Image (cartoon, grey):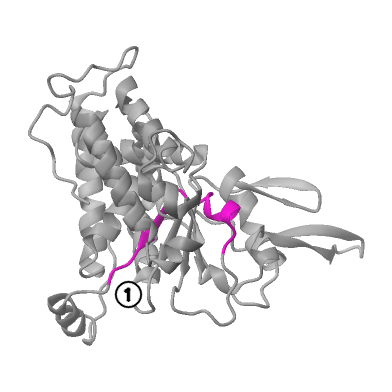
Amino acid sequence: MQTVIPSQSPMQPPPGQPAPVGVMPITEQRLYQAQEALGGLKAEIERRLYGQEALVVQAIIGLLARGNVLIEGQPGLGKTLLVRVMSEALHLDFSRIQFTPDLMPADITGSQSLVHDEHGRASLEFRPGPVFANIVLADEINRATPKTQSALLEAMQEQSVTVGGGRRPLPAPFMVIATQNPIEMEGTYPLPEAQLDRFLLKLEVAFPSFETLRDIGLHTTGKDELATARVMDKATLVSLQELVREIAVAPHVAEHAARLTMATHPDAPDAPEPIRKYVRYGASPRAMQALILAGRAHALLCGRAWMSEEDIHQVAHPVLRHRMIQSFDAKLDNVTNNDLVDQLLATAAKHVRA
């Protein structure tokens, strides 16, 4: 995923593309300030996390879009480090929940306890759980039982939890970043489709190259431990999250996102042949929302006040790869959801050129 500032004007769409109607323009000063802040955040995370530039960009997109993120990768590739460094660089409240088979929902949300005052009178007092933080790391989420996994559903969707019959809002900004290990099968409970759909993005961590592996060994095993610098405060982050939703989206770009979402369904007229053969159920309307939100965030990272079809293509894999339910034939033919997204983008590119 590239985030290079484009050569055309960041304020106006390129020639031949219609401008959005009824949208207040974003000033160049706000764009410049956003670029400065986001560039500093990206550089600080990459200073601690070697060889994962694409992962860092995608995580920042999830943060800007106020979405929840699922990260999948082998052990030791820096999934937990990414979340911890991001929270430190933003100076946000951070909590880590280690998911295990014996973890209970109350261990996440908190519970009411019986307490006594100085006169001996008893009352119930709510003691908040680790979910009451700005960034919550659900580590190895697929190791917990479905009952415990579902305790995160309300928090992820409503930014609140219900305990003892009372609704308790979570602090803002709020974000759940969950990790899972694809090679650990014994003692795991795969996330159901309804919960997967609540993650804005699913990120995949690639194994580092030889050069990156060498740098990791050289720079992370010395006597001095690197400290994370604070590069952004909470107020700046919230303003950037609001700015993302002001990025202009032209009608034809929204139609492109809708067409891409519809094409994930095997019974859709525009569905490519691999989708008809290898997909049982396509993406939900949340995929459409995720394409627009993540596309807007990508446009802001590129320094533009408007969103294009290319922004949608850049975020299509993390948005769609976990939202298509494969058929049995896909497993037999070793076809992955990433392969299916490639087919969708190839078909969409032909439609755009036409």
Please, which residue is most extreme toward the left here? 7
Depth order, front residue of 153/96: 153
Residue topped by disc 1:
77
Total tally of numbered discs in the picture = 1
Check disc 1: other Cα within 10 Å, few if <14, some if 14-19, many if 20+: some
Q: Quadrant of residue 130?
A: bottom right
Q: Position of residue 327 (x, y in %)?
A: 50, 58
Q: Quadrant of the C terminus?
A: top left
Is 353 displayed left or right of 163 in the figure? Answer: left
Please, which residue is most extreme toward the top here? 22
Q: Residue at x 28, y 69 (%)?
A: 206
Is 188 displayed left or right of 291 in the figure? Answer: right
Q: Position of residue 257 (x, y in %)?
A: 36, 33
Image height of 190 relative to 296, above or below: below
Magenta segment, which residues?
A: 191-206
Q: Quadrant of residue 90?
A: bottom left
| Secondary structure under the numbered disc 1 in the rendered image | loop
Q: Residue at x 56, y 82 (%)?
A: 186
Residue 233 visible to an observer of this rendering: no
Image height of 40 relative to 255, above or below: below
